[in-house]
Amino acid sequence: METESSRHPTIRGVYALADTSLLAGAELIARVEAALRGGAAVVQYRDKSVDSARRLTEAQALRALCARHGATFIVNDDVDLALSVGADGVHLGRDDPAPALARVRLGPRALIGATCYDRLELAPAALGAGADHVAFGRFFPSSTKPGQIYASLDLLRAARASLSCPIVCIGGIRADNAAPLVAAGADALAVGNALFGPGVDSEAAARALAALWKR
Ligand SMILES: Cc1ncc(COP(=O)(O)OP(=O)(O)O)c(N)n1
Ligand SMILES: Cc1nc(C(=O)O)sc1CCOP(=O)(O)O
Ligand SMILES: [Mg+2]
């Protein structure tokens, strides 16, 4: 049986973006749990508010939920919050603390993701500075974070050919547009709206995404 101490968190498969602009109040836990039942393997808590009390409560609850399901739990942006709740790691972009600082604070076992947008050349620097996995995107139009630059399948193929770390794809990903990303070497697909948008059956959506690796 897997125990807390024997668990080896990884970045692989359906990476659920638990974004509080999509998931308010009680919906947060209920729908993330549904996505976990459907096969989500990673959960990222993404909350852009400054309500530190709510952020702590929500991150603690998600951390406990992920532990019960054997899923990896990542906090977006906030190294201190990740440390406070015992998250498996943190995801950082260009406006966030540097991966090197996160590595020092979180230790050698932490999972530290770095966004590389549409730029493969950012990856070696991020990995050299303490990140252990990278993300590229957006691949499709995203209503959750509009206006981002597009990454291409060619970029993903080049990244797969040159990087041995886990690669996450993000941005407008759904079960019906994601197969080329998996074929090009994505290890994980970070998905917000297609899992947690209004009216979406989060369990069924996660199951359909997880099936992409079983073809
Ligand atoms: C898995 C994953 N990839 C990319 C991002 C985007 O990070 P960032 O550029 O720091 O933007 P914000 O999400 O913080 O607005 C991400 N969060 N997760
Ligand atoms: C948080 C984030 N970062 C992006 C980037 O391109 O860097 S796209 C994005 C939102 C992803 O959510 P959805 O699956 O709803 O499009
Ligand atoms: Mg960020």
Image (cartoon, grey):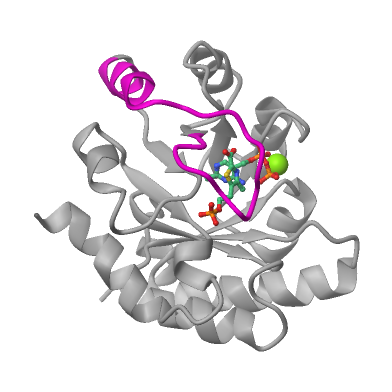
Using residue 119 as the reference point, say whether residue 52 is left or right of it: right
Residue 94 seen anywhere in this rendered image of the structure? yes
Q: Position of residue 128 (x, y in %)?
A: 54, 16
Name the magenta segment's main secondary structure: loop
Q: Is residue 2 above or below residue 100?
A: below
Q: Quadrant of residue 159?
A: top left
Q: Quadrant of residue 180?
A: top left
Q: Quadrant of the N terminus?
A: bottom left
Q: Residue at x 77, y 33 (%)?
A: 97
Q: Is residue 86 above or below residue 200?
A: above
Residue 39 seen anywhere in this rendered image of the structure? no
Q: Position of residue 6 (x, y in %)?
A: 35, 62
Q: Position of residue 61 (x, y in %)?
A: 64, 79
Magenta run includes residue 127? no
Q: Quadrant of the C terminus?
A: bottom left
Magenta run includes residue 143? yes
Using residue 32 as the reference point, say whether residue 92 is left or right of it: right
**Residue in the foreground of this view, choosing between 70 and 139:** 139
Q: Position of residue 189 (x, y in %)?
A: 39, 49
Q: Which residues are magenta?
A: 137-161
**Residue in the foreground of this view, choosing between 124 and 149:** 149
Q: Quadrant of residue 112?
A: top right
Q: Quadrant of ligand 1?
A: top right
**Residue in the foreground of this view, choosing between 90 and 172:** 172
Q: Residue at x 56, y 27 (%)?
A: 117
Number of marks in the rendered image:
0
The residue sitting at the left extreme is 215
Q: Residue at x 64, y 70 (%)?
A: 22
